[in-house]
Image (cartoon, grey):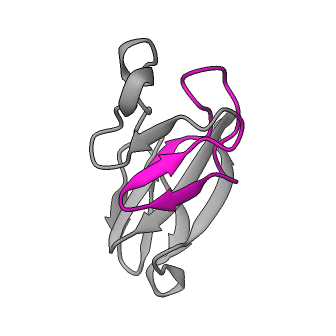
Amino acid sequence: MAYLALEKLHQLYDGYRQPLRVAGRELLLLQEEGRLYLIANRCPHMDAPLHKGSVRQHLLRCPTHGIEFDLRDGRAQGGAAACVGSLEYIPLVYEGNTVGVVL
């Protein structure tokens, strides 16, 4: 297994968003309220990219259909919760002054 650095820690800030391609997968690295997340850059509803979505009070809103997902647990909120899957999280690894993933 190999470590792949995605970003230097000093580059991160609340509101940070970076779409990435890692090992052929489209991912989204984002920081909100001091917490860093790495998720699949696809809405579980209809595969729309999430990197242009808005975030407010822990809720990531899909820019295509408006479905909101709680970043703390990945679950869809409101009426959509019953029929939409959760966000897919990828574990982050901290090494030195970087954050990344293990491949």
Residue under the point 34% across and 32% down = 75
For the N terminus, the image quarter is top left
Residue 45, given in percent of the width and then of the height, sits at: 57, 21
- Point out the stretch of residues depicted in magenta: 38-64
Image-quadrant location for residue 49: top right
The magenta stretch spans residue 59: yes
Q: How many callouts does the rendering have?
A: 0
Spot the residue most to the front.
79
User: As rendered, which of 51 and 100 lies closer to the eye?
Assistant: 51
The magenta stretch spans residue 25: no
Q: Against 93, is 80 above or below?
A: above
Residue 9, given in percent of the width and then of the height, sits at: 44, 80
Q: Provide the major secondary structure of the magenta segment.
A: loop
Spot the residue most to the top.
83
Question: Is 51 on the left-hand or right-hand side of 69?
Answer: right
Residue 64, given in percent of the width and then of the height, sits at: 72, 36
User: As rendered, which of 31 and 96 lies closer to the eye?
Assistant: 31
Spot the residue most to the bottom.
10
Q: Against 61, is 85 above or below?
A: above
Residue 38, given in percent of the width and then of the height, sits at: 46, 50
Question: Is 19 on the left-hand or right-hand side of 77?
Answer: right
Residue under the point 34% across and 57% down = 93
Question: Is 78 on the left-hand or right-hand side of 44?
Answer: left
Question: Is 12 on the left-hand or right-hand side of 79?
Answer: right
Q: Against 4, is 90 above or below?
A: above
Residue under the point 60% across and 64% down = 17
User: As rendered, which of 16 and 20 lies closer to the eye?
Assistant: 16
User: As rendered, which of 74 and 19 lies closer to the eye?
Assistant: 74
